[in-house]
Amino acid sequence: MICVAIANQKGGVGKTTTAINIATAMAASGWRTLLVDLDPQGNASTGLGIPTAERTHTSYDLLVEGSALPLCVKRTDIPNLDIVPATQDLSGAEVELVAVEDRVERLRRALSNADYDVCFVDCPPSLGLLTLNALGAADTLLVPLQCEFFALEGLSQLLQTVERVQERFNPRLGIVGIALTMFDRRNRLTDQVADDVRDCLGNLVFEHVIPRNVRLSEAPSHGLPALIYDHNCPGSRAYIGLARELIGRLPEQRKAA
Ligand code: ADP
Ligand code: MG
């Protein structure tokens, strides 16, 4: 199994939307896919139609209680796509794990026997213990980056964290790519930011850019990935392209691992 963390400490940059739709695209291409919701807000769980009442075993149990993975997994309505849902309880994990010795390796342990082809971890908007667990478990990192003025500033902090994780507890962590999200062609600043990011980071930036598209934001309220809700909207088509690009890059990440 190859594990991809989807992280950026900024909120509202498209992490969850990217996680849901790329996971769906890969599941549809035949990859046995697991999505771990590691954000106490549980947006990925909601977006995949798992009601709160059905989140009896969650990523909290996986991390804090040491529950076995199969117990915490729920099927989604999408063939090949399972999820470990999250609830508010998870916000306590940051505090409860502080004194635990293997606190940054909980997720890696929990996933060590997982029987999937690929696992995505949807991270919360911080660089705390939850995100560190995701980076500790991951073979590689995918960073959604919103095309706005402060985008690059947050990125350098994230890349420093990646270096620290590589040095301290996960030398095999790679960066598979940076996905530009909420791109608005009519906004000159957006264009400028996208150009700057490409100048700065070159090939690390995925060619496929995710446009700002209201269908992407409507889909979660129906408990459906945009890819299912409206397969043909520009946002869905962009995510299908991004997923294909990601699949092309994964073998390299695997080799590095
Ligand atoms: P994060 O997980 O980084 O906090 P989300 O994926 O939840 O970000 O996105 C934040 C908000 O923006 C959500 O309401 C989501 O539906 C919306 N959104 C995400 N991507 C797009 C997009 N490309 N176009 C329009 N709305 C988007
Ligand atoms: Mg989110």
Image (cartoon, rainbow, N blue to C red):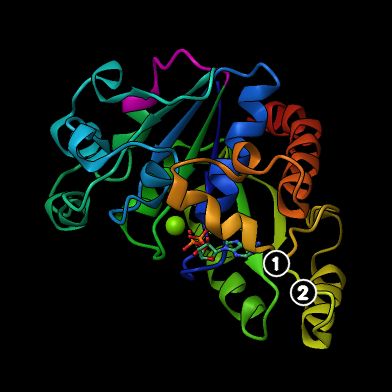
Q: Amino acid at mark 2?
A: Asp
Q: Which residues are magenta?
A: 110-117
Percent position (x, y) of residue 215? 63, 56
Query: Based on the displayed image, in which of its 4 quarters is residue 254 positioned?
Result: top right
Judge from the rendering whether residue 130 lies leftward or rightward of residue 176; answer left or right: left
Does 52 appear in magenta?
Answer: no
Residue 9 in percent (x, y) is at: 47, 66
Find the distance from the CA under tag 2 to the CA under tag 1: 6 Å
- The structure residue drawn at horizontal position 66% and vertical position 77%, both measured from the top left corner, is 152
- Vertical position of residue 201 compared to residue 88: above or below: below
* Residue drawn where x is 23% and y is 47% of the image: 87
Q: Secondary structure at mark 1?
A: loop
- Tag of residue 184: 2
Amino acid marked by disc 1 = Arg
Task: Estimate how packed mark 1 is, as few (under 14), some (14 to 19) or many (20 or more) residues with alpha carbons within 10 Å.
Answer: some
Q: Quadrant of the N terminus?
A: top right
Disc 2 element: loop
Depth order, front residue of 119/224? 224
* Placement of 41 over or under 226, stated as above or below: below
Q: Is residue 113 magenta?
A: yes
What is the magenta segment's predominant secondary structure? loop
| Mark 2 vs 1, N-terminal side | 2
Q: Is residue 235 left or right of residue 40?
A: right
Residue carrying label 1:
212
